[in-house]
């Protein structure tokens, strides 16, 4: 499957090169004549990376072309680049991506870059030993994706690194270093912006730590996928879920439903959690299989379905994490 995806990416690159060559030259000339100096070009894959970069750019964002590739609500795990996406990557000054298994297409996309001075940031590499292996906890459905990863050998890492504020601090620092490389004249501005943004991240992280410390229960139960492994581990929280964070499954077995319903009773939980864009069917079925059938369904936003429209309407990483904190407090008390 991965070989097929790689072949598709290569074909897209070839097609895109011929189709967009003249257009790119015209656009480049337009930028130079309109602005005097060519704007720095930064391409990011998902929303959190885009928003971190925008905040570190600060007022200099007007002097940059900042692109978010996954801007239609497409999930990271199912995204494949278009020819136009590949062209944006191969011509940019800096490309920032998560670097997990879902980004296997990136290696092919970077083989024929036109900008040999491009700064490429693989955030999972930047995270180093702080990245975590995907895990299957008791009661969770296993799927073919997980077994395929085991068969290929080597650990499969959880890609949802942005859902930890501690990780965000590390990764924003890496992004700022990249900006200094492509635009050294504004290094002091980027450093100052990073310092201000890091303070906001650390302040919010302290609120999360306080909420977890004062929580009546330390367990979360998801009638859904569970992309919050990093967040849970940050604050010593336990969890049960229907599927792992990267699972492609959408139907839970009777055994899984029954197990989760019994856990609700055993732990006295009052909430079942879901993630963004969930149809809540599994959560409702779990609740229907409890004695009281009175549990509330709450939603934690994993920021995997943010669209261009959401960005234009003011979508914001820190605001979303604050909203998640409010949900978390309700779920743990």
Image (cartoon, helix red, strand yellow):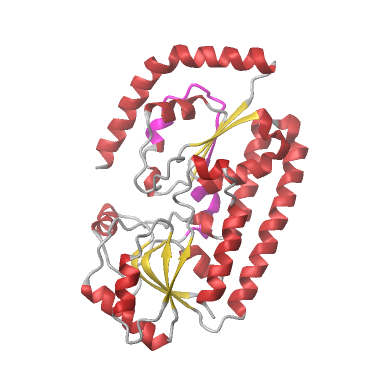
Q: Is residue 148 visible?
A: yes
Q: Where residue 106 appears, x then y in whole percent?
A: 41, 37
Instruction: Residue at the far left: name it.
Output: 254
Which residue occupies the foreground of this view, 305 or 77?
Answer: 305
Q: Tell me: 286 left or right of 32.
A: left
Q: Where residue 160 appears, x then y in whole percent?
A: 46, 56
Q: Where residue 172 appears, x then y in whole percent?
A: 62, 48
Q: Is residue 236 visible?
A: no
The stretch of residues the image draws in magenta is 107-131
Is residue 191 shown in magenta? Answer: no
Which quarter of the rendering shows the C terminus?
bottom right
Compared to residue 10, the image places residue 50 above or below, namely below
Which residue occupies the foreground of this view, 244 or 220?
Answer: 220
Is residue 110 shown in magenta? Answer: yes
Compared to residue 308, the image places residue 241 above or below, namely below
Q: Residue at x 38, y 21 (%)?
A: 16
Which quarter of the rendering shows the N terminus?
top left
Q: Tell me: 155 left or right of 128.
A: left
Q: Residue at x 44, y 14 (%)?
A: 21
């Amino acid at each position: 499957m991965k070989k097929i995806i790689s072949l598709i990416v290569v074909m897209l690159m070839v097609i895109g090169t011929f189709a967009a060559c003249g257009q790119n030259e015209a656009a480049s000339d337009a930028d130079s004549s309109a602005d005097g100096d060519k704007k720095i070009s930064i391409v990011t894959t998902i929303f959190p990376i885009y928003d971190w970069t925008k905040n570190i750019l600060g007022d200099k964002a007007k002097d940059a072309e900042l692109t978010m590739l996954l801007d239609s609500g497409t999930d990271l795990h199912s995204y494949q680049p278009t020819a136009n996406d590949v062209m944006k990557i191969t011509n940019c000054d800096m490309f920032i991506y998560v670097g997990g298994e879902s980004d296997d297409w990136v290696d092919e996309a970077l083989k024929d870059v036109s900008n040999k001075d491009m700064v490429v940031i693989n955030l999972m590499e930047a995270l180093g030993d702080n990245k975590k292996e995907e895990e299957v906890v008791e009661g969770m459905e296993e799927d073919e994706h997980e077994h395929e990863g085991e068969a290929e050998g080597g650990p499969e890492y959880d890609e949802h690194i942005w859902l930890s504020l501690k990780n965000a601090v590390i990764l924003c620092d890496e992004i700022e270093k990249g900006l200094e490389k492509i635009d050294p004249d504004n290094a002091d501005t980027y450093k100052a912006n990073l310092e201000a943004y890091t303070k906001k991240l650390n302040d919010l992280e302290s609120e999360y730590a306080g909420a977890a410390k004062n929580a009546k229960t330390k367990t979360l139960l998801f009638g859904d996928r569970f992309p919050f492994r990093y967040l849970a581990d940050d604050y010593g929280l336990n969890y049960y879920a229907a599927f792992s964070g990267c699972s492609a499954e959408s139907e839970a077995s009777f055994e899984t439903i029954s197990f989760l319903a019994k856990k609700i009773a055993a732990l006295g939980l009052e909430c079942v959690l879901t993630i963004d864009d969930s149809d809540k069917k599994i959560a409702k079925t779990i609740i229907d299989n409890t004695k009281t059938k009175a549990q509330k369904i709450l939603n934690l936003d994993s920021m995997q379905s943010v669209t261009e429209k959401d960005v234009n309407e003011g979508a914001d990483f820190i605001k979303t994490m604050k909203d998640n904190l409010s949900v978390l407090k309700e779920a743990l008390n």
